[in-house]
Image: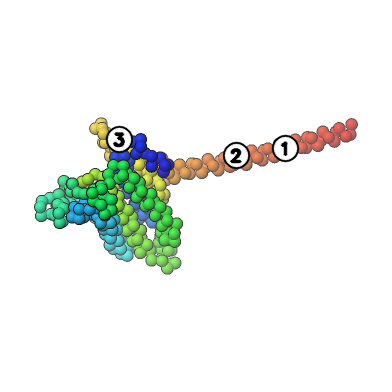
Amino acid sequence: MFILLLLLPAVFDTNTPTLLGIWALFALSLGLMWGYAGILSFGHAAYFGLGAYTYAITSMNLGESTAAWIFAILLPAFVAALIGAMMFYGRISDVYMGVITLVFSLIMAKFMGATAGDAYSIGNARLGGFNGIPAFPILNVPGDPSTPIFGTALYYLVLCCLVVCYLVARWVLSSAFGRILLGIRENEARIELLGYNAPAYKTAIFSLSAAMAGMAGCLFASWAEIVTPALFGLGQSVEVIIWVIAGGLGTLMGPIIGAVLLGTMKLLLGGQTFIDNSLVIGAILVLVVLLLPKGLLPTVMGWRKQQGQRSVSRAHSNSLRRRASERRQQRSTGESDKTGHRS
């Protein structure tokens, strides 16, 4: 699979696969937090958009992308740590936590949309209101602004970031930290009775998830070469939730698969005007919840496991039948020998 992804630019244009890889990274960021710590953010697009805007503003002021790339990851992580500490140490319920994350995303979208005019500038970067910020420097080779990263190079960079974040997520989940997160998801009160600081662990994974979302936003900004308040919008937050649910909550590869499949469908439907793509995506969500409540990947894995168990059971049954047949043949042979001796 990985080899096919490496060879993809030799056969196809990389523009669409690059975007799908960015969406997959965004979905992975939410899937890690929601699937393994039980924390659902209804406004996860806030950190995606924050990463994109941070990169655009910083790169316009510095003229180079290395520091902008770093800030685009660190600022969403820092903001998420502040909000997470407030929610988790404040013992806010899941319902109100969802409201807070959603409202934060909507506030960011509304605020950035109201920043038209020369008065709303940060250094050399005009925020631009609903028109957003265009024409900022794209990603470049670190320390060399004259060598931009675009096209096939950007595709490989996105693929590298996705693989690294996936491996980091697996490492986190296989560590003691990850096992405590799973315990918090299942029974937070029991984890705290064992002496662990559950709010601290939840804040940490919330911040890590936001950092990954910020990285995805930074890559998107460099790919699109424009950032707008729509990146903070409700639609963006809802889409990533649907991707995670469809692919399979509680897995790392599931959100990636969901983002790629539904993202591809979204792009294909976007080229026609016969039916609204949001309606189709919503219908798919309903069908997935009804027919595949665990998501696509867990369902396929469960089916394969069941088929494997059936194969083992069938092989065991065939082995027993073969042994029984051999014993019957031995008995009949023995009886024939006895009859021959008597005669």
The numbered dot on residue 268 is 3
Question: Which residue has dot 2 on it?
Answer: 314
Q: Residue at x 36, y 54 (%)?
A: 33
| Real-space Cα separation, disc 2 to disc 3, in angstroms | 43 Å
Q: Determine contact: label 3, label 1, CB under 8 Å.
A: no
Left or right: where 133 falls relative to 211: left
Count residues near mark 3 (Cα–Cα under 10 Å), then give few for <14, some for 14-19, many for 20+. few
Q: Nearer the viewer, residue 39 or 46?
A: 46
Q: Position of residue 291 (x, y in %)?
A: 41, 40
Looking at the image, is mark 3 or mark 1 nearer the viewer? Answer: 3
Number of callouts in the render?
A: 3
Looking at the image, is mark 2 or mark 3 nearer the viewer? Answer: 3
Q: Amino acid at mark 2?
A: Arg
Mark 2 residue element: helix
Q: Residue at x 74, y 37 (%)?
A: 328
Count residues near mark 1 (Cα–Cα under 10 Å), then give few for <14, some for 14-19, many for 20+. few
Mark 3 residue element: helix
| Real-space Cα separation, disc 3 to disc 1, in angstroms | 60 Å
Question: Which residue has dot 1 on it?
Answer: 326
| Real-space Cα separation, disc 2 to disc 1, in angstroms | 18 Å
- Whether residue 33 is visible to the viewer of this picture, yes or no, is yes
Q: Amino acid at mark 3?
A: Leu
